[in-house]
Image (spheres, rainbow, N blue to C red):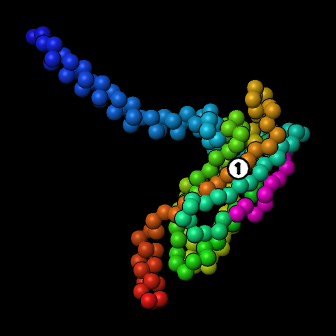
Amino acid sequence: MAMSGPQKTVVQLVSVVVLMGGLAWASVPFYDWFCRVTGFGGATGVASAESDEILDQTITIRFDASKERDMPWDFTPVQREMEMRIGETGLAFYEAYNPTNRPIAGSASYNVTPYSAGGFFEKIQCFCFEEQVLQPGERVQMPVTFFVDPEIVEDRDGKYVHTITLSYTFYEIDLPEDYASLDDQVQENTN
């Protein structure tokens, strides 16, 4: 049974819509995978252990902190920069402080610049994308452990990088259920 012109057109249009929907659905995880593998867009690598090679060459790591517009915390790097040997494990801290009278939950995203260094900046441990809840007046220091992959000196673009900036941006998220009920009680007692 052959399809007529209008039926064939409808089948083709539905096929295109399904294909485009599938591509849109797959684009976010594919892009995330692509960025992690290539370092594109400042995405970093994730390492489970320290580098087994440390070079005599040094590189400067700068630390930057910012907040989403309405995030009430104070958020800063404890140290603004450090010079370290390529391949050496570094440990840096960021400090967050909740100056308000209520618990606030936050989560941080990050990036590395220049983008060409992203695939060579290996995080061993960090606080990014983890829920952090600070009580009123609470101050915490959050560690990030990392190294710069020695392969950066062999990369066409990476070998010209002498300074890498690691930036974190904190944004407010919804409080977990158990904290939300405590926050409601605090608000009732202050009124």
Q: Residue furthest right?
A: 56
Q: Name the residue at 21% across, 18% down.
A: 9
In the image: residue 72, left or right of residue 123: left
Query: Residue 178 at what x, y percent from top left?
Result: 43, 74
Query: Residue 162 at what x, y percent from top left?
Result: 82, 40
Say whether residue 54 is visible: no
Q: For residue 85: magenta?
A: yes
In the image: residue 113, left or right of residue 3: right
In the image: residue 17, left or right of residue 165: left
Q: Specify the amino acid type for callout 1.
A: Leu
Query: Residue 72 at what x, y percent from top left?
Result: 58, 69
Magenta part of the chain = 76-86
Which quarter of the figure has residue 126? Answer: bottom right
Q: Residue furthest top?
A: 2
Placement of 61 over or under 173, stated as above or below:
above
Quadrant in which the C terminus appears: bottom left
Quick one: SS at disc 1? strand
Query: Looking at this view, is 87 or 185 the one in front?
Result: 185
Which quarter of the figure has residue 95? Answer: bottom right
Say whether residue 110 is visible: yes
Q: Residue furthest front?
A: 69
Query: Looking at this view, is 54 or 97 the one in front?
Result: 97
Which quarter of the figure has residue 106? Answer: bottom right
Q: Name the residue at 55% across, 33% down.
A: 34
Q: Name the residue at 10% across, 10% down.
A: 1
Query: Residue 63 at what x, y percent from top left?
Result: 74, 54
Q: Name the residue at 55% across, 81% down.
A: 101
Q: Main secondary structure of the magenta part?
A: strand
Q: Which residue is mark 1?
A: 166
